[in-house]
Amino acid sequence: MTDEDQQERVDGIAPGTTAAFDADSASDDAEAAPGTAPEPGSSMSTDRHPTTGAMSAERLAMKALEARLLGGERKLRRREVAAGAGLSLLSARKLWRALGFPNFGDEDVAFTERDQAALSTVVDLVRAGKLTEEAAISVTRSIGQMTDRMVVWQIEALVEDMVHEQGVTDAVARKRLVNELPALVDALEEVLVYSWRRQLNAGVQRLAVRAEAGLQASEEGREGDEDDAPLPLARAVGFADLVSYTSLSRRMNEKTLARLVQRFENKCAEIISVGGGRLVKTVGDEVLYIAETPAAGAEISLALAEAFTEDEILPEARVAMVWGRILSRLGDIYGPTVNLAARLTTLADPGTVLVDSMTASALEHDERFVMIPQEPENVRGFGEINPVRLTRGRGRGLVLD
């Protein structure tokens, strides 16, 4: 047993637990030694002009921005941060990996006091019994992955705006961004925290308080009670897939393709939000969404098909929706319902919406929708199914501003 392993037994986060932070430690043996490549933009990079030793204006601006974002200058090594949080290095590395941080060597001065405080915050939740170690890692990973995607999105949006508005090249815009960001940091942070609180409230309502409505609807055609259900959540699961996206993208330049993708994502997000659903993810030319009831899923699906049919720039979309049970994990959804919705999307004609027969049964008494049975189809993994084309009945449907 190494000295580090012995120390871990002494200062582990939750003595007597399953010690989730200690798992998968074999990969740590190959961790980079001193001399590991520094984090891009870090103060460990070369800051000074090789001839004069003077720091360039760009580097000065970058260091000032970094100090503001990180809460000060990097002064601490990884062992110092871990010790300050009362944690072994092994456990600290597990949390840093969950956040998506790069590996640092023992001698790399890569951390600030704010890093130590953040580490202590997570550890204190475990020590107080508010989170298990496994839950702490999962929650931390969710923060790391979501904020990573968010900042990439924001930086690209700001660069694109500067290219368009200031008439500069992409390379010039990326350099100017360092000087533009300080005026935006506080406002972006405030909106981020505001949005997180609103989204957390909405998520609690969706996944806990209002879940009963979906569960009651799922009782249709099923014997037994909720305790025998194979998956916990009843949801309408939908896919919308742009037609001929691949061939279109080959004929477009970078700027045109970027505008098309952005237009597609914006329109999907707006319609799904207005319909009371949630956009789970967008993958290229396809969007995955959920809603709490069959009717809400049907309204969103019809609105998506209609919107892309009427759009003067975007191609039509194939849409499919299935009402059933799902497993929600890691911000994504899983289960046969998701797979069936994906399969049905490939069967739909451009500009139309397909549902399966059980979803059609859940909607058949709602005068807002009309169901048109289609020819049976053999679907991989499901055998023969009876797709039904969903069309609009009475009512206006979703009203977009």
Image (cartoon, helix red, strand yellow):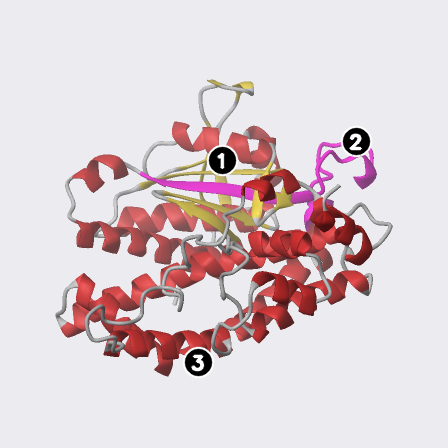
As drawn, 124 above or below 216: below
Query: For the image shown, how many numbered marks are present on the structure?
Result: 3
The reply to whether residue 61 is visible in this rendering is yes
The label shown at residue 11 is none
| Residue that label 3 marks | 187
Tell which residue pokes out farthest to the right in this image: 16
Badge 2 vs badge 3, beta-carbon distance below 8 Å = no
- Residue at 41 percent across and 51 percent down: it is 303
Task: Describe the element under mark 2 as helix, strand or loop.
Answer: loop
**Kind of residue at disc 1:** Met
Q: Which mark is first along the chain, 1 or 2?
A: 2
| Residue that label 1 marks | 371
| Residue that label 2 marks | 223
Residue 160: quarter of image: bottom left
Instruction: Between label 3 and label 1, give the one nearer the viewer.
Output: 3
**Kind of residue at disc 3:** Ala
Q: Which mark is first along the chain, 1 or 3?
A: 3
- Residue at 25 percent across and 48 percent down: it is 314
The residues colored magenta run 214-242
Q: Say which quadrant the C terminus sits in.
A: bottom left
